Image (tube, rainbow, N blue to C red):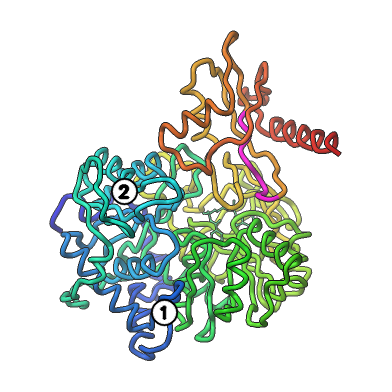
Amino acid sequence: MTTPTSSPATEDVVHWPADLAARYRTEGYWQGRSLGSYVADHVAAHPDREALVDGDTRLSYRQLWDRSAALAQYLLDLSITPGNRILVQLPNCWEFVALTLACFRIGVIPVMALPAHRRHELTHLAALSESVALVVPDCDRDTDLREVAQQVAADVPTIRSVIVHGDFTSALGEAAVPEHSLASGLATTARFASSEYEPSGSDIACFLLSGGTTGLPKLILRTHDDYAYNIRACCEVSRFDADTVYLGTLPSSHNFPLACPGILGALFVGGRTVMLSSPAPERALRTIDAEAVTVAAAVPAVAQAWIEHQREHGTLRGNSFAVLQVGGSRMPDELAARVEPVLGARLQQVFGMAEGLINMTRLDDDSEVVVNTQGRPVSEADEIAIVDEAGQPVPDGTPGALLTRGPYTPRGYFRAPDHNVRAFTVDGWYASGDIVIRRPDGNLVVAGRDKDMINRGGEKISAEEVENFAYQLDGVDMAAAVAMPDPRLGERVCLYLTLTPGHRVELDDVVAAMDAAGVARYKRPERVEIVDAMPTTKVGKIDKKDLRERIRDRLAHESASRG
Ligand code: OOB
């Protein structure tokens, strides 16, 4: 342990109770192995089998393993050592997989930032995790991420280096810390002894990000043991095997495409992953045929785009495509019913969370279940409770708040004791904030939520975070961000404001304030409604239910009057 930041302090981490941890070990849920070791088995068994495809790059298990060793050595050479955190923000590319494996092999902990994150989010995540390095692409659309990374490094004293993927040659304005290139990392000769670095099952494997009901995302600590079980349980339910060809097209740092079973799942079973930088329908459907993809994962908005594209253009002609997993936000039943007839792939609904619990419909469920429910827990060791406002269990068929515990659902967020008190019960149940109905057959239907979040096509936006930006504007008295329905994305952000007399605030002003603060674009409100007063509940809180209904009715009225 070479620096003060080399391992998180124990008080920052909430562990499973010792008796339960012992049970999870004895019963084989936790196998005491590092995530990398599961992939290593396949490297040894069939080194030449193809593991990863990204455009023209095709890597066998052996080649992927060697590249991850080179990157691991590179991290070590940069004095990034076991227990250190690094903030990783990469698009879907083979280097993401090689780097993730590199971290898993030597116990460096990747913090899985999203490609859309900008200075505001990256600074918070780097500071909270005390990251020692940032790994970024050179740019994302029109944003120079090298510049952004240096701004973050200037604000977060633990950061010692920035590692750039892509063009690295042009001069940089002002550098707070030295830049290095991922390409030179890949050219490094590995010299480290694997056995010296092999993490144990209880070591931290990675940090995922919470969907965000509070101002800024919380960090979810996943251990090698629990995440490996998450992946294995999902592989079993999704029947992943050596013949699986998985299309990784949702942003890989999300739990769903990463580990449910996702990219890592395909590598756990000796299958193959095809990385695609965007889920745009034409290319995605062509890739499914060209690479004989068997399974893909999509959010409902992406599934809808694929279905429409297929109907119009008939792009998909082959017959490899067996399963389309859909999750991240509620899939309308009518859309669910169109998947198999149009795309020829069986639908698997996935209702999961980065905090743990994953529910899935089963591949041999009746169509009625697959179309109308979001499935059931993937593990027999998952505990779920559906409760009313007093915390009492509700009968099947009645909506209630979903609580969960289990071998891959951690007991607390990292360094968030105050928030943990609210998000977890004293008995360690995680309050998901989802309102669900359990049917007598055990399948769950997501009926709503009681968390203050907007789910924009699977991307989660904290209402509080948007409101905080509105409050920075002159003349804003009260602000309330709510979901407004959208036929494509499911929901978008509508911001209700009350203003001090004589002031004017428009959508552009809010967006400009968020842009100036370096906030990810997907969090931008897309409509502002000015009202004289906010409706309030009996206890005097802003009545968001009322606001959601108002904007829903208004949109319906506007669309009716457009004809
Ligand atoms: C996935 O993970 P997160 O952490 O981005 O978001 C979790 C939340 C859930 O609590 C729920 O509110 C919503 O996203 N959600 C769904 C859903 N899947 C997720 N709501 C309705 N229907 C669904 N099928 O989104 C995630 C993680 C792993 C696998 C799949 C999704």
**Which one is nearer the viewer's eye here, 71 or 406?**
71
Direction from residue 339 to residue 76 in the image, left or right: left
Please say if 276 is above or below 49. Answer: above
Dividing the picture into quadrants, the one containing residue 396 is bottom right
From the top left corner, tell me how far across and down residue 427 is, in percent. 48, 52
Residue that carries the numbered disc 2 in the rendered image? 146
State the image coordinates of residue 375 (x, y, percent, origin top left): 66, 65
Q: Residues within 10 Å of mark 2 (few under 14, many from 20)?
A: many
Q: Amino acid at mark 1?
A: Arg
Whichever of labels 1 and 2 marks the residue nearer the N terminus, that label is 1
> Would residue 243 be seen by someone viewing this image from the given angle?
yes
User: Magenta residues?
Assistant: 488-495
Q: Which residue is mark 1?
A: 58
Residue 489 shown in magenta: yes
Q: Quadrant of ligand 1?
A: bottom right
Quarter of the figure with residue 385: bottom right
Q: Can you say whether 519 is above or below 267 in the image?
A: above
Quadrant of the snapshot with the C terminus:
top right
Please tell me how many numbered marks the rendered image carries: 2
Residue at the location (45% across, 83% down)? 270
Hey, which quadrant is residue 495 in on the image? top right
Look at the image and say whether residue 180 sits in the magenta stretch: no
The residues bearing labels 1 and 2 have C-alpha atoms spaced at a distance of 28 Å
Please, what secondary structure does the residue beneath circle 2 have? helix
Count neighbours of disc 1 (C-alpha within 10 A) and say few if under 14, some if 14 to 19, many if 20 or more.
some
Horizontal side, residue 258 vs residue 352: left or right: left
Dominant secondary-structure state across the stretch colored magenta: strand
Which residue appears at 68% of the width and 23% of the height?
535
